[in-house]
Amino acid sequence: MRISERLARIKPSATLAVNAKAQELRAQGKEIISLAVGQPDFGTPKHVVEAAKAALNGGFTRYTPVPGIPELRDAVAGYYGRFYGAKATGDNAIISNGGKQVLYNLLMALVNPGDEVLVPAPYWVSYPAMVQLTEGVAVIVPTNPENNFLVSVADLEKHRTAKTRVLILNSPSNPTGCCYTQAQLDEIAEWALANDVFIISDEVYDRLVYAPAEPATLSRFYEVHPGHCAIVGALSKSFCMTGWRMGWALAHEDLVKAMIKIQGQSTSNVSSFSQKAAVVALEGSWDIVEEMKVSFVRRRDFAYDIITGWGAVCPKPDGAFYLFPVLDKFFTKDAPDSAAMCTKILEEAGVALVPGSAFGDDRCIRFSYAVDDEVLRDALTRVGRVLTGK
């Protein structure tokens, strides 16, 4: 048996590797705290669960149209009008199995072999691999913590070539939690428009932004220039629906049709009753988000104070639920990089973290604060002992 050559170039998921090691240690009877999980510790809101139950009880369990049921596509379009004043119709929306499939479908539809895709680093772990699977070239654009790991037009211009076709932006960022302002996004969008670079704007964490920062979006840019931008969204983080696999794209109708073709030959439609629940989530109360934000801000603040108390450089995030400190000052001969340090911390402190190398910056380690306050405090105390000896 021969495995395709394209897969030989793809590295296994670092987050899954960390989880596998943690499970192995748990099986040995060791207590493990995971700060590696990228999902809220809150439950899916009751009214959303009840909507799924009602759909099941009503027999809504058959195939649906590939891009989603019409009322959900309309609800996605309405979401951008409700929160951002951007106009769109259901024909501009496609529903996919989480934001991950949306991103993959977009890249499959947009990238030809040899096309270059600009990927600012730190990046979400799957961006480069997805580009590779489309036979494109991921061009990594480094950033630094002094600028909150945010890319500038000057940074992008240094890496732009005649082969540059797509830019992937992510705000709020996974892994850093840092956010672009609306002015920064608009400046990048104008640069991309002038240079015929298509923007995929990953806005999955867009409602998890903490005051005084405000949510920023390219949905209004999309409204004016639909052929130059697509917006990626999901209910995974904002509505605690990670297992429901409910993501979407807002895109030009022709691009949506191309994605329907891809999805129709791969996964087809999203779970039917999950779609009914998603309509209720999008069109109903968003109180759950405000409740989560109160907890996340509190956790962010005390985790940030502990981590910077180690002497680590760490931008204070304005969104999502991650901290991404620079910890290379603690690397040793036995733990010379972020992966080795995460293994050391897991084995000695019983805390699972994700190495920065998975996100394109080996100086750093990602901490998720989407766990109970006391669990978080305990985990950080343990990590601090490994790093500082205190």
Image (cartoon, rainbow, N blue to C red):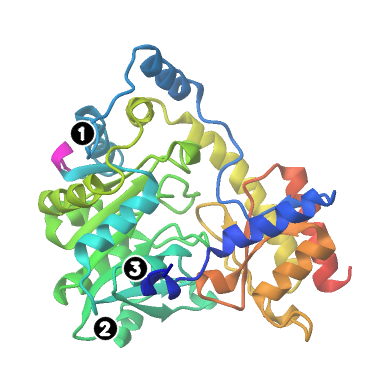
From this view, report whether residue 313 is shown above or below residue 158: above
For residue 133, the mark is 3
For residue 65, the mark is 1
The amino acid beneath tag 3 is: Leu
Q: Secondary structure at mark 3?
A: helix
Pointer 3: residues within 10 angstroms few (<14), some, or many (20+)? some
As rendered, which of 186 and 206 lies closer to the eye? Answer: 206
Of the numbered discs 2 and 1, the one sitting upstream in the chain is 1
Residue at horizontal 71 percent and vertical 52 percent from the top: 23
Of the numbered discs 3 and 1, the one sitting upstream in the chain is 1
From this view, report whether residue 52 is shown above or below residue 301: above
User: Which segment did they paint magenta?
Assistant: 87-91
Q: Measure the C-alpha gap from mark 3 to mark 1.
A: 26 Å
In this rendering, the label closer to the viewer, 2 or 1: 1
The amino acid beneath tag 2 is: Arg
Is 44 left or right of 105, judged from the image as shown?
A: right
Q: Secondary structure at mark 1?
A: loop
Q: Position of residue 42 (x, y in %)?
A: 59, 35
> Quadrant of the image for the N terminus?
bottom left
Residue at horizontal 66 percent and vertical 54 percent from the top: 301
Of the numbered discs 2 and 3, the one sitting upstream in the chain is 3
Residue 188 counted in the magenta span: no
Residue at horizontal 14 percent and vertical 40 percent from the top: 91
From this view, report whether residue 90 is shown above or below residue 178: above
> Quadrant of the image for the C terminus?
bottom right
As rendered, which of 208 and 168 lies closer to the eye? Answer: 168
Q: Measure the C-alpha gap from mark 2 to mark 1.
A: 39 Å
